[in-house]
Image (cartoon, rainbow, N blue to C red):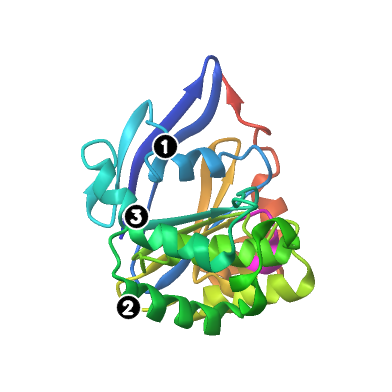
Amino acid sequence: MLSVQQVGKTYGPFHALRDVTFSAQGGEVFGLLGPNGAGKTTLLRILATLLRPDSGQAQVAGFDITRDPEAIRARIGIVNGGMGLPARLTGREVLQSFARLYGLTRAQTDARITELDDRLELGRTLDTRAGEYSTGMKQKVVIARAVIHDPPVLILDEAASGLDIFARRTLLDFVQASRAPGRLTVYSTHVMSEVEEVCDRVAILHGGALITLGTLNGILDATGERTLERAFFALVRGQPTGGAHV
């Protein structure tokens, strides 16, 4: 579902990504863990075809990011912590408009909205204007908008940022329930507890480089630590911070 081979990205002398290589399979929630500035968002923007890498290559859902960007965009959903919604539209109107963009019929759209209402507890957000939403209400609709077309690959970039405890729980439960054959969720965060709860495997990025990849238990065993936080600090100790400079 996802293959990344020696992907690099620079901004002048700054290396945002340095020869990052990994793969992820359908049926798993794959974590990207790292502090702010580690390169997570740059990598996800490359996978979403919003940025071009300076080196390396990647495939998403079987399509090359440089040769088939439109095919990839039709097969992914993206959520980050800063996405907005048109203030004058209700949640239902937002979802209906995006469903039309993806070619869903009215019947398909209504069925999908009903399903997402059940899974995300959309409730009154569907018929309330987005300008009246709390942060949690907005993020629920943003997630529903990202998956209205039922994409095989879902990319979540700090999607829990700023959510209250109830909205965060709904998000994490949704991620857990999204695990299915032929589907991949990429969950990017700097919050260790979220990775521990929802991710099957995790890639740790630091200074633009991939410093380890494995299951939680595998990483703990390799570092001899008992928590992911302690394992993270053991792994990054002595590594360059905030990206590497030429």
Circles 3, 2 touching at the beta carbon (< 8 Å): no
Amino acid type at image mark 1: Leu
Residue 221 shown left or right of residue 69 in the figure: right
The residue sitting at 30% across, 38% down in the picture is: 57
Residue 55 shown left or right of residue 225 in the figure: left
Q: Report helix, strand or loop for mark 2.
A: helix
Quadrant location, the C terminus: top right
Residue 229: assigned label: none
User: What residue range appears in magenta?
Assistant: 189-194
Give the residue furthest to the front.
88
- Residue tagged 2: 107
The residue sitting at 34% across, 60% down in the picture is: 100
Q: Does the magenta portion include 87? A: no
Give the residue furthest to the bottom.
118
Residue 78 location in percent, x, y? 48, 54
Residue 50: assigned label: 1
Residue 149 location in percent, x, y? 36, 65
Q: Does the magenta portion include 190? A: yes
Spatial separation of the CA atoms under disc 3 and disc 2: 15 Å
